């Protein structure tokens, strides 16, 4: 296909430019190709200054003050990743079967007034009152998956638990009865890796196929709701006659994908942090009500979403530099969470930290994560139940990390646990 040949050329060119910049020590080029522990790397960026320029165009910041200010500043907007260099995925086109990218075409990537209009249509499902009513259902889902692994001795924490719970929770919230969890877990991994930008034509083809499957799935959920008013998110969306097919697919797709991939990694990163910090883990076992504080510190210490970005909509003075219209600022929120100007002894995992909730792991401003309350609740219920049931949980093999940087998490985590009192009794 001619389009794919052009794409291959564009990717080869941008890859070469990135490799040259990386060899010259460029911070953004290094971030894009980074593997391994990102936290020392963020410190190296912090050491270079508050606002660091990349030869690739954008600025980067690890400063909490600056990240927070940009996220709340109406002179900055969002931009679909497909409009960022280097590629357009080639999904555009007309007609009723056009594939919609739920991340790029949703309100996550829209500025006001469109953002405000679409976000408002689903906000009522995420109020504290709406969430409280879901707590029992979440506890039942967590118990179901713990029961399934209890007595097995060994299991994969990610595949058998951390990925299962959020997928079932978000499907319930949306009103999707067919949860296809394995396929969804794969979609999540593919979409999360694409947030870093695509590298090869093969990856683009895989991404297109994933988005087509996701569209088919959402189309079935939407069709199942036709003429059947339902008390769930898709039901609420379909009660808005002005929403187009694209709006419906993008909004429900955003909630589905944002709703599980990040929460999966909150649970996984949380388990790793607790296995690495036996004192904190013991505190959680002795006092399960400490779970919300534990979750807050996990979010600060090792967040699933490591960075985001904003585009200047007009010239903006920032940290003594002028950001030109159209220039992009990469906001290293995971680095901001370890800014010593805000957090004492920032590299220490400390569940007693009084200002842990000042982290930027759910961003800030108008795009502040709509599912933050749900994620906090799911994380607390899941970790509390897991360590109460398996206080002796331990690693039983090598941990395999996800092939993504903007979304940080674990793909495989073999663990071992003694049979719990529940099963033994
Ligand atoms: C630990 C879990 C989660 C993390 C770390 C997380 C993180 C984030 C971040 C950083 C943003 C803002 C991105 C930006 O402005 O560039 C965001 C937005 C969003 N998140 Fe989450 N999220 C989590 C869970 C969830 C859940 C469970 C849902 C829904 C069920 C959800 C739905 C959304 C939506 C709809 C937006 C777009 C908000 C807007 O643009 O107004 N997230 N999330």
Image (cartoon, rainbow, N blue to C red):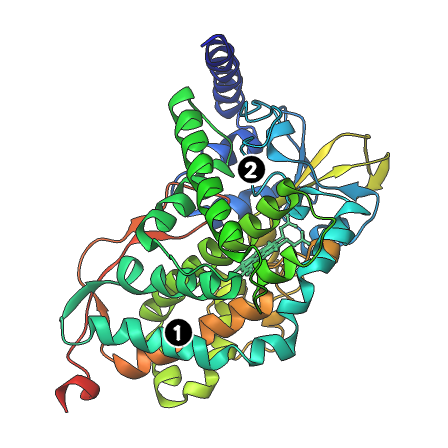
Q: Position of residue 299 (x, y in %)?
A: 52, 64
| Image quarter (top left, top right, bottom left or bottom right) of the C terminus | bottom left
Which residue is rendered at x = 49% and y = 10% of the image? 9
Q: Which residue is mark 1?
A: 382
- 340 is higher (above) or lower (below) than 2: below
Real-space Cα distance between discs 1 and 2? 30 Å
Q: Position of residue 90 (x, y in %)?
A: 55, 22
Which residue is rendered at x = 41% and y = 86% of the image? 288
Sequence-earlier tag: 1 or 2: 2
Is residue 22 or residue 395 the one in the foreground? 395
- 152 is higher (above) or lower (below) than 313: below
Look at the image and tell me whether residue 34 can be seen: no
Q: Which residue is mark 2?
A: 101
- 185 is higher (above) or lower (below) than 392: above
| Image quarter (top left, top right, bottom left or bottom right) of the N terminus | top left
Is residue 339 or residue 89 the one in the foreground? 89
Neighbourhood count class around disc 1 (C-alpha, 10 Å): few under 14, some 14–19, many 20 upward: many
């Amino acid at each position: 296909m001619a389009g794919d040949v052009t794409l291959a050329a564009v990717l080869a060119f941008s890859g070469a430019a990135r490799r040259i910049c990386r060899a010259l020590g460029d911070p953004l080029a290094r971030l894009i190709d980074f593997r391994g522990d990102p936290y020392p790397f963020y410190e190296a960026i912090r050491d270079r200054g508050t606002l660091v320029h990349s030869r690739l165009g954008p600025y980067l910041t690890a400063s909490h003050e600056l990240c927070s200010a940009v996220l709340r500043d109406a002179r900055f907007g969002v931009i679909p990743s497909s409009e960022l260099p280097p590629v357009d995925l080639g999904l555009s086109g007309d007609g009723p079967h056009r594939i919609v990218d739920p991340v790029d075409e949703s309100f996550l990537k829209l500025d006001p007034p469109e953002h405000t209009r679409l976000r408002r249509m689903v906000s009522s499902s995420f109020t504290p009152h709406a969430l409280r009513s879901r707590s029992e259902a979440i506890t039942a889902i967590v118990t179901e998956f713990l029961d399934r692994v209890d007595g097995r001795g060994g299991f994969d924490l990610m595949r058998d638990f951390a990925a299962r719970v959020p997928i079932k929770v978000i499907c319930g919230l949306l009103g999707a009865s067919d949860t296809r969890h394995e396929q969804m877990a794969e979609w999540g991994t593919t979409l999360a890796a694409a947030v870093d930008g695509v590298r090869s034509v093969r990856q683009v083809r895989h991404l297109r196929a994933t988005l087509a499957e996701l569209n088919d799935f959402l189309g079935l959920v939407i069709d199942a709701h036709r003429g059947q008013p339902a008390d769930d998110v898709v039901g609420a969306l379909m009660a808005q006659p002005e929403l187009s097919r694209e709006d419906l697919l993008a909004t429900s797709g955003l909630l589905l994908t944002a709703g599980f991939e990040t929460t999966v990694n909150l649970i996984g990163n949380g388990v790793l942090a607790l296995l690495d910090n036996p004192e904190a883990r013991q505190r959680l076992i002795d006092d399960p009500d400490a779970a919300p504080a534990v979750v807050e510190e996990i979010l600060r210490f090792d967040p699933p979403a490591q960075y985001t970005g904003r585009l200047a909509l007009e010239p903006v003075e920032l940290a003594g530099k002028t950001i030109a219209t159209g220039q992009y600022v990469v906001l290293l929120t995971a680095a901001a969470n370890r800014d010593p100007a805000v957090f004492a002894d920032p590299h220490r995992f400390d569940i007693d930290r009084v200002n842990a909730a000042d982290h930027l792991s759910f961003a800030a401003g108008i795009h502040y994560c709509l599912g933050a309350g749900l994620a906090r609740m799911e994380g607390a219920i899941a970790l509390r139940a897991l360590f109460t049931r398996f206080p002796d949980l331990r690693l039983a093999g090598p941990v395999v990390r996800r092939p993504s940087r903007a979304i940080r998490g674990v793909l495989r985590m073999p663990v071992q646990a003694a049979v719990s009192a529940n099963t033994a009794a």
